[in-house]
């Protein structure tokens, strides 16, 4: 029979973190920190073309994207 009272029965209480998710995030964070420390060494191992390609792909995570500004014909040009 379905619960039609609007009250929650069983399971985690609201706001309680999922234990598996917390452990998985912690493990992934540790792996990423180790890999980040190895980036300079790994870049040195790549050929120049591959190194530049990777750096271009990583740029959006470091630098904000620049939007072009279009000027209207009635705006003064400096």
Image (cartoon, rainbow, N blue to C red):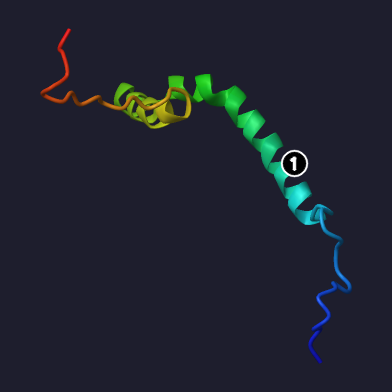
**Extreme top residue here?**
78
- In the image, residue 25 sits, relative to residue 54, either above or below, namely below
**Extreme left residue here?**
73
- Give the total of numbered labels: 1
- In the image, residue 31 sits, relative to residue 10, either above or below, namely above
Residue for badge 1: 26
Going 18% across and 23% down the picture, which residue do you hit? 71
Q: Is mark 1 on a helix, strand or loop?
A: helix
**Extreme front residue here?**
74
For the C terminus, the quadrant is top left
Going 10% across and 24% down the picture, which residue do you hit? 73
Horizontal side of residue 34 vs 56, given as left or right = right
**Extreme bottom residue here?**
1
Q: In which quarter of the image is residue 45?
A: top left
49 or 16, which lies in front? 16
Q: Quadrant of residue 18?
A: bottom right
15 or 35, which lies in front? 15
For the N terminus, the quadrant is bottom right
Going 67% across and 42% down the picture, which residue do you hit? 28
- In the image, residue 20 sits, relative to residue 45, either above or below, namely below
In percent of width and height, residue 72 lies at 15, 25
56 or 60, which lies in front? 60
């Amino acid at each position: 029979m379905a619960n039609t009272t609007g009250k929650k029965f069983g399971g985690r209480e609201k706001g309680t973190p999922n234990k598996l998710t917390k452990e998985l995030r912690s493990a992934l964070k540790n792996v990423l920190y180790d890999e980040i420390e190895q980036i300079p060494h790994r870049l040195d191992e790549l050929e120049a073309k591959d190194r530049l390609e990777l750096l271009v792909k990583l740029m959006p995570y470091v630098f904000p994207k620049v939007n072009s500004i279009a000027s209207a014909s009635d705006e003064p040009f400096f």
